[in-house]
Image (tube, helix red, strand yellow):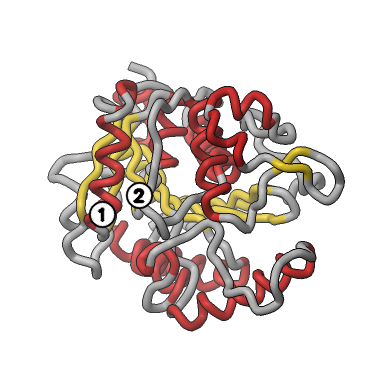
């Protein structure tokens, strides 16, 4: 068995820098966004510095901002999610997609594979369907999204059916076995060029609530007109399967790695976001145990936050050559 190859990109010096192809580099132009989504104008107000902004502690404002961003930058005619479901920050989600494109390019002589021959699996697509929207709009990729929540799947289907460009590009599947990630989703002889995942971070609801309260104290410290007794609100929302699971992030990714062995020759790159840097050593150890041939860690910057994803592949050199010739360069 070949030795595991573990690579890590260098940390970027400018923490405010998003990926060069990310269209969300500049400050939000709220006038343009309100043109794309008129209802956003109801939430636009001067912040403490006198600049136009929205109240990011208000879930309705955050959802409406997302709707405007998806309309303006990605041509989405309709987008909505039920109350309480995860409403992710669009710039960070776009960064993951663009770095995945770079990962594929690095495996294809520097050329980003584009178009419908490139197939991606989004594990835990959620109700928002954001990764498939961005990945298809930016690179023309085909997507399968999986989720354990029937409401999330139904909401994704509504978004897909309401946007002509997504109808033949995105398919979502219900995972009926919550203990499995790929089994029951991954069809016989189906192959994916990339698997992506934003795993649940917390180990339990109590752990999530404690973190939410800590963040809320920070928000209150910056917003003087809020009641000190106000109840913490998850401004980006999230249901139980989206926010916590047994073993938290480390446990989820460990299960994903072990399951990926079964599909080792039917996927080029498996990837997962890793929010907590302290989980990396355990992840690397499991990847070595299962015989991953390549492992890469890619760092990304969103605001003052450094995030990352880990990617692993089982393919031999001959399989890589075949994959390039058969799927990407044909």
Residue receiving disc 2: 127
Query: Could you say where residue 277 lies in the image, as x and y percent from the top left?
Result: 62, 66
Per the image, label 1 sits on a secondary structure element best described as: helix
Instruction: State the SS at label 2.
Output: loop
Instruction: Kindly indicate the quadrant of the structure image that contains residue 256.
Output: bottom left
Rendered position, 54 above or below 71: below
Q: Position of residue 308 (x, y in %)?
A: 59, 54
In which quarter of the view is residue 148 placed?
Answer: bottom left
Towards the viewer: 56 or 180: 56
The tally of labels here is 2
- Which one is earlier in the sequence, the residue at label 1 or at label 2? 2
| Residue at 58% in and 74% down | 231
Q: Are marks 1 and 2 in contact (CB under 8 Å)?
A: yes
Which residue is label 1 attached to? 151
Kindly indicate the quadrant of the structure image that contains residue 41: top right
Q: Residue furthest left?
A: 188
**The C terminus - image quarter:** top left
For the N terminus, give its image quadrant.
Answer: bottom left
11 with respect to 104 (left or right): right
- Which of these two is toward me, 134 or 114? 134
- Where residue 74 sits in the image (x, y, percent)? 49, 26
């Amino acid at each position: 068995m070949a030795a595991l190859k573990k690579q890590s990109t260098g940390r970027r010096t400018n923490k405010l820098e998003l990926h060069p192809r990310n269209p969300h580099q500049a400050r939000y132009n709220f006038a343009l966004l309100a043109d794309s989504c008129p209802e956003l104008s109801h939430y636009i107000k001067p912040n403490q510095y006198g600049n136009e902004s929205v109240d990011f502690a208000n879930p309705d404002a955050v959802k409406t901002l997302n709707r405007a961003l998806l309309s303006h930058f990605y041509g989405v005619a309709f987008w909505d999610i039920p109350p309480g479901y995860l409403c992710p920050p669009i710039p960070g989600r776009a960064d993951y997609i663009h770095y995945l494109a770079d990962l594929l390019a690095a495996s294809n002589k520097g050329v980003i594979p584009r178009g419908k021959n490139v197939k991606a699996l989004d594990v835990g697509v959620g109700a928002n369907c954001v990764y498939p929207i961005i990945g298809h709009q930016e690179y023309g990729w085909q997507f399968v999204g999986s989720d354990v929540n029937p409401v999330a799947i139904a909401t994704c289907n509504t978004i897909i059916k309401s946007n002509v460009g997504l109808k033949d590009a995105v398919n979502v599947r219900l995972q009926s076995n919550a203990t499995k990630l790929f089994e029951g989703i991954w069809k016989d002889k189906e192959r994916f060029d990339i698997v992506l995942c934003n795993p649940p971070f917390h180990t339990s609801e109590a752990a999530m609530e404690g973190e939410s309260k800590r963040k809320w104290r920070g928000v209150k410290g910056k917003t003087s007109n809020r009641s000190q007794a106000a109840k913490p609100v998850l401004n980006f929302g999230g249901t139980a399967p989206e926010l916590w699971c047994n073993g938290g992030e480390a446990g989820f990714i460990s299960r994903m790695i072990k399951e990926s062995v079964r599909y080792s020759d039917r996927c080029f790159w498996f990837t997962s976001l890793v929010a907590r840097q302290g989980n990396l050593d355990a992840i690397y150890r499991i990847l070595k145990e299962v015989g991953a041939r390549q492992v890469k860690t890619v760092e990304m910057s969103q605001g003052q936050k450094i995030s990352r994803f880990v990617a692993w592949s089982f393919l031999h050199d001959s399989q890589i050559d075949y994959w390039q010739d058969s799927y990407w360069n044909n």
